[in-house]
């Protein structure tokens, strides 16, 4: 089973930027859709952005225009560029394949905190 390791989180002021990275333990080239999810304290995990093998991307309304997802199948990486960050973006961010039902195995995630 492919495992994912996320990195790049941290503390940033409102309006700032971060770039998250996710490396997979195996090939992601055959995984049609990869996504970034997030989970804030007391809330359910939600899908933030997804990207397919043909680089078609989709975003949740609350990040549209601010976040950009990309993937490098040759290196088994998925990235999330986050700009114009808001306090509401504070959460633990995870990457995983996009699937129904939602995947049951997750990495540790990377904490993003947006605060002045």
Image: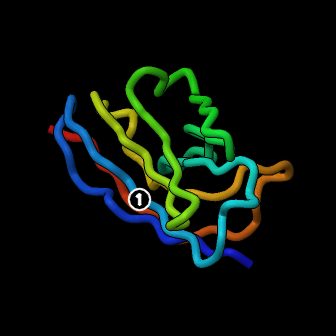
Left or right of 16 on screen, residue 76? right
Left or right of 1 on screen, residue 87? left
Residue at the limit of the structure toward the right, as seen here? 101
Residue plotted at (21% across, 40% down): 115
Residue plotted at (48% across, 22% down): 64
Q: In this rendering, is residue 103 above or below 83?
A: below
Q: Quadrant of the C terminus?
A: top left
Q: Secondary structure at mark 1?
A: strand
In front here: 28 or 100?
Answer: 28
Q: Which residue is mark 1?
A: 21
Q: How many marks?
A: 1
Colour scheme of the rendered structure: rainbow
Residue 30 % position (x, y): 75, 60
Category of crowding for the residue at label 1, using alpha-carbon neighbours closer than 10 angstroms: few (below 14), some (14–19), many (at least 20):
many
Q: In this rendering, is residue 82 above or below 101?
A: above
Q: In this rendering, is residue 47 above or below 24?
A: above
Left or right of 9 on screen, residue 110? right
- Which quadrant of the structure image shows residue 55? top right
Left or right of 112 on screen, residue 34? right
Residue 33 % position (x, y): 71, 47
Residue 74 % position (x, y): 55, 64
Residue 58 % position (x, y): 61, 30
């Amino acid at each position: 089973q492919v495992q994912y390791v996320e990195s790049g989180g941290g503390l940033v002021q409102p309006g700032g930027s971060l770039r998250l990275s996710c490396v997979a333990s195996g090939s992601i080239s055959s995984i049609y859709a990869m996504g970034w999810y997030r989970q804030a304290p007391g809330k359910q995990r939600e899908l933030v952005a997804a990207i397919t093998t043909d680089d078609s991307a989709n975003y949740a309304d609350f990040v549209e225009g601010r976040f950009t997802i990309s993937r490098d199948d040759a290196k088994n990486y998925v990235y999330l560029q986050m700009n114009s960050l808001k306090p509401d973006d504070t959460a633990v961010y995870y990457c995983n394949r996009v699937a129904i039902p939602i995947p049951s195995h997750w990495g540790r995630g990377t904490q993003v905190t947006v605060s002045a």
